Image (tube, rainbow, N blue to C red):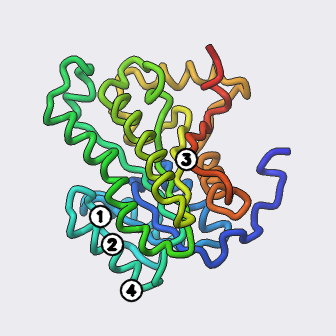
Amino acid sequence: MSPESTDRTRPVLAGMKALITGIANEHSIAYGCAKAFRELGADLAITYAAEKTRPYVEPLASELEAELFLPLDVGDAAQMEAVFGQIRQRWGRLDILLHSIAWAPKDDLQGGLLHCSGEGFARAMDISCHSLVRMAALAAPLMDKGGTLLTMSYYGANKVVPNYSVMGPVKAALEACARYLAYELGPKGIRVHAISPGPLKTRAASGLKNFDLLLNEAAERAPLGELVDIMDVGYTCAFLATPYARRVSGETLYVDGGVNIMA
């Protein structure tokens, strides 16, 4: 039975508080996740990365009735602490954290791993990977009754995807961080997952060379015969945040129509 033919309105996340990071526009994976969380009853806090992205994100936050709309440059420690401080002040707790942030300098991303600068590699690792660790440290005290942390990876973390370059090793590190955080935060009832969507037309993906070829190949190889969209990812993340997934943690979950199982 397809999602379109089922009733998805049951508010299984009612009363839960969710922080969504990484929305850039209406094509962002994070936006699909935010829509799914809200549709299932969660209250939202949404961040935007910089003033230049605010005009694109603010209407989406308004549409989703976000209770908090805050700036978050993950490289600014004070700003990150302020976000979690606002959540503590407004809600006193947090149930769901979505980390959907990835970035590398364009020259380092498009020049191949062999020619990636040390500075570019370190910057990509800090923004795309270690920022999850910093967020987890701030979120954990707000999840005193348990919670769910979700981050976005990609197939290139485990297999070589031409032109994915420095982001392959970075995403591999991100998946490892998710596993170690799941171990360390498990005793607190906090579950951690890396989600690995199939190729999607997002702003981040537009920086990859020959990305249209990846899309076409994925559609041809997927056992389900079609590409996924941001809502497919969003509903998967929503499921993982529900009590139905209360004994699932530390997973890297593929949402790609089955592409990852193909040789």
Q: Residue at x 30, y 28 (%)?
A: 166
Report, in whole angstroms, how far the alpha carbon at label 2 lies from the one at label 4.
10 Å
Please name which of the two marks, 4 or 1, marks the residue nearer to the observer: 4
**Badge 1 vs badge 3, beta-carbon distance below 8 Å:** no
Return the disc, 3 or 4, that comes first in the chain's sequence: 4
Return the disc, 4 or 1, that comes first in the chain's sequence: 1
Report, in whole angstroms, how far the alpha carbon at label 2 lies from the one at label 3.
25 Å
Q: Residue at x 55, y 21 (%)?
A: 216
- Type of amino acid at the residue the image marks with label 4: Gln
Report, in whole angstroms, how far the alpha carbon at label 3 lies from the one at label 4.
30 Å
What label sits on residue 83 in the rendered view?
2
What label sits on residue 89 in the rendered view?
4
- Type of amino acid at the residue the image marks with label 2: Val
What label sits on residue 250 in the rendered view?
3
> Is there any visible trace of residue 26 in the rendered image?
no
Q: Secondary structure at mark 2?
A: helix
